[in-house]
Image: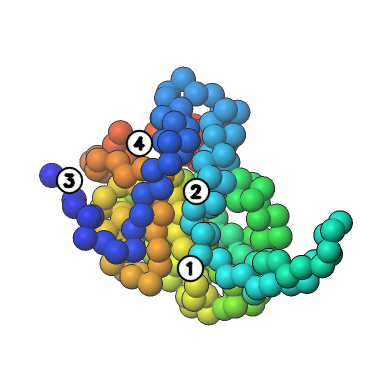
Amino acid sequence: MSIDVSDLKNFQVIDHPLVQHKITMLRDVSTGTNQFRALVSEIAMLMAYEAFRDMPLEDIEVRTPIETCMSPVISGRKVAIVPILRAGLGMVDGILTLIPSARVGHIGLYRDPETHEPHEYYCKLPDPISERPIVVVDPMLATGGSAVDAINMIKEHGGKNIKFMCIIAAPEGVRKLCESHPDVMVYAGHLDRELNSIKYICPGLGDAGDRIFGTK
């Protein structure tokens, strides 16, 4: 029986028609590596447009060809993009296209093939992480274990203003992440039905890392 996540206040599906169209193309088993990689980047850019709608602004003085005026720019420290390695790397360029000045950190986690539990092997974050808006990215939110652990690591380093963004989510992972970190807004491109017995999202799109990097 599928898990209900309708009561979660910190979860949002970005159901823009362009996002949904591109996700359908991602799912297709016949979509090759080059196109798959491009689609992941495009979807990340479209989702970031919505996820960063609340970025703070401040007015600065600008001289136009006609006159001088006050006009808004983004204020505060540069955004930190933190992909969960390795599949999360596929979403970085799309967000950088939208926010070229963003800083990029990396968190390395791998999933034990038997227990399906995440294990850390790398963490490098922009400094000072405590003063930056942060978006953690991973194309798939399955069990939620890697996402929960990655955000735990960021908080241990002082990170506070954190969002999480994925392309496909399973209800099991959404509930685990949202309940473990109620202060983190979670954005997904699509909420799928469930996890299967080996913890793959159904209907899903297969292994995102393998499809992005052309590995088996």
Element at badge 3? Answer: loop
Closer-to-camera residue (27/71): 71
Dot 2: what SS?
helix
Which disc number belongs to residue 162?
A: 1
From the top left corner, tell me how far across and down residue 163 is, in percent.
Answer: 46, 63
The residue shown at (60%, 64%) is 80
Q: How far is disc 1 from disc 2 in space, using C-alphas?
A: 15 Å
Nearer-N-terminus badge (2/4): 2
Question: With respect to residue 74, does 173 lie above or below?
Answer: above
Q: Residue furthest left?
A: 1
Q: Earlier in the sequence, mark 1 or mark 3?
A: 3
Residue at the spot of label 4: 204
- Of labels 1 and 2, earlier in sequence is 2
The residue to which callout 3 is attached is 2
Position of 97 with respect to 166 (left or right) is: right
- Residue at figure coordinates x 26%, y 52% from the top left: 172
